[in-house]
């Protein structure tokens, strides 16, 4: 059992809840922090060393209280707002992603946290042709990506000026267990299971599709590296394909490709037509990647939905 105390923000979210469970399975002492709903958390009560606490990262006072109470020495920041279509409050996007992270990092510095993982976003890059390397020029095309890039610049500044041990991870196209019903895979599954048509764009966008548990394993390997790559930005991505091909792979499992109505929706005004990761830096750090196939991942998701 690790002697570390991990604090996870956004622990009830899609990615945070999976990291939370992986750490608990490994007998780590973990504090999971959430803001609103406790979805994806209550099912973890079967584990030992399980702690949850409500945390509003936009409140400097609340952040200080949580750090003082639990005294974590490792921080994993999964808290964010703006990735879902319903997350369209620009003030909240800015306040959560930038001010909230500022509060966390300042308190982590005061408490001398040993290692910090911060989840940025592939949307920081904007659209590029071909696979994107970490050193590519970032040109975000939506407000969410702009705030996440501003946050990255803030963290790199603190890494240099305060010598804070921070690594910024940029996930690409994560899917799997605990996804919001607003996201693509749950929408396809619901259409197939209910035998209802699903209106989609033409689906010619190219995206990575990374199964969430693979991404969690890579994240924890980075966190536990002997030589922590402080100050680095690292892409997390794997399978790259067109959206329509990915959607068809899922619908085919139900013999329901006919329900996918491509071209019924227009592309967004700022649609990124290509967003795929060059993961060579990740491989150099942690070695060969464990990658779950789409069919394997889908089986796991369906089992969880039935339960």
Image (cartoon, rainbow, N blue to C red):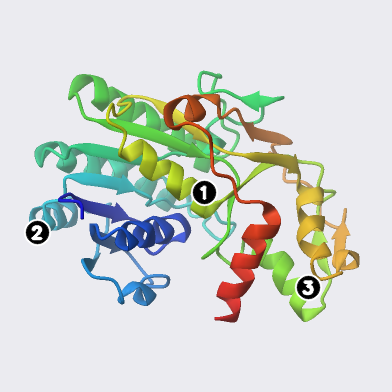
Could you tell me which secondary element the residue under label 2 belongs to? helix
Quarter holding the C terminus is bottom right
Helix, strand or loop at disc 1? helix
Q: Which residue is mark 1?
A: 214
Give the Cα separation between the discs numbered 3 and 1. 25 Å
Q: Nearer the viewer, mark 2 or mark 1?
A: 1
Which quadrant would residue 291 be assigned to in this image?
A: top right
Tell me if label 3 and label 2 are in contact, CB under 8 Å. no
Mark 2 packing: few (<14 Cα in 10 Å), some, or many (20+)?
A: few
Q: Tell me where residue 109 appears, x and y as whole percent.
A: 15, 36
CA distance separating discs 2 and 1: 32 Å
Q: CA distance from mark 3 to mark 2?
A: 47 Å
Q: Where is residue 101 shown, x and y percent of the image? A: 30, 43
Ranked by sequence position, the earlier of labels 3 and 2 is 2
The residue that mark 3 highlights is: 192
- On screen, residue 129 versus residue 132, left or right, reads right
* Quarter occupied by residue 94: top left
Splitting the image into 4 quarters, where does residue 302 fall?
A: bottom right
In primary-sequence order, the first of circles 3 and 1 is 3
Q: Residue at x 82, y 57 (%)?
A: 248
- Between 236 and 288, the one lying in front of the other is 288
Which is nearer the N-term, disc 2 or disc 1? Answer: 2
Q: Position of residue 92 (x, y in %)?
A: 41, 52
Q: Report if the CB atoms under discs 2 and 1 are less than 8 Å apart.
A: no
Q: Is residue 40 left or right of residue 62?
A: right
Q: Is residue 151 visible to us here?
A: no
Query: Residue at left 33%, top 26%?
Result: 229
Kindly identify which residue carries mark 2: 69
């Amino acid at each position: 059992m690790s002697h570390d105390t991990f604090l996870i923000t956004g622990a009830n979210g899609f990615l945070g809840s999976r990291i939370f469970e992986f750490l608990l399975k490994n007998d780590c002492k973990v504090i999971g922090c959430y803001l609103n709903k406790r979805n994806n958390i209550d099912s973890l009560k079967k584990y030992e060393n399980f702690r949850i606490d409500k945390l509003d990262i936009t409140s400097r006072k609340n952040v200080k209280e949580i750090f003082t109470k639990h005294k974590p020495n490792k921080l994993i920041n999964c808290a964010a707002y703006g990735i879902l279509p319903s997350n369209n409050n620009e003030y909240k996007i800015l306040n959560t992603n930038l001010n909230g992270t500022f509060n966390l990092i300042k308190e982590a510095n005061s408490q001398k946290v040993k290692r910090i993982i911060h989840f940025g976003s592939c949307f920081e890059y904007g659209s590029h042709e071909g696979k994107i390397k970490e050193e590519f020029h970032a040109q975000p095309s939506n407000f969410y990506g702009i705030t996440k890039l501003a946050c990255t610049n803030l963290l790199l500044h603190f890494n240099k000026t305060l010598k804070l041990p921070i690594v910024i991870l940029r996930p690409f196209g994560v899917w799997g267990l605990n996804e919001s019903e607003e996201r693509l895979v749950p929408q396809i599954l619901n259409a197939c299971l209910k035998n209802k048509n699903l209106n989609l764009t033409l689906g010619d966008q190219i995206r990575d599709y990374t199964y969430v548990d693979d991404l969690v394993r890579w994240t924890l390997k980075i966190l536990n590296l002997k030589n922590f790559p402080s100050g680095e930005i690292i892409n997390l991505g794997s399978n790259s394909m067109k959206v329509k091909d990915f959607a068809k792979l899922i619908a085919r499992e139900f013999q329901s490709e006919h329900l996918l109505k491509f071209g019924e929706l227009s592309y967004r005004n700022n649609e990124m037509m290509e967003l795929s990761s060059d993961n060579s830096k990740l491989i150099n750090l942690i070695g060969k990647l464990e990658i779950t196939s789409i069919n394997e991942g889908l089986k796991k998701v369906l089992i969880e939905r039935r339960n």
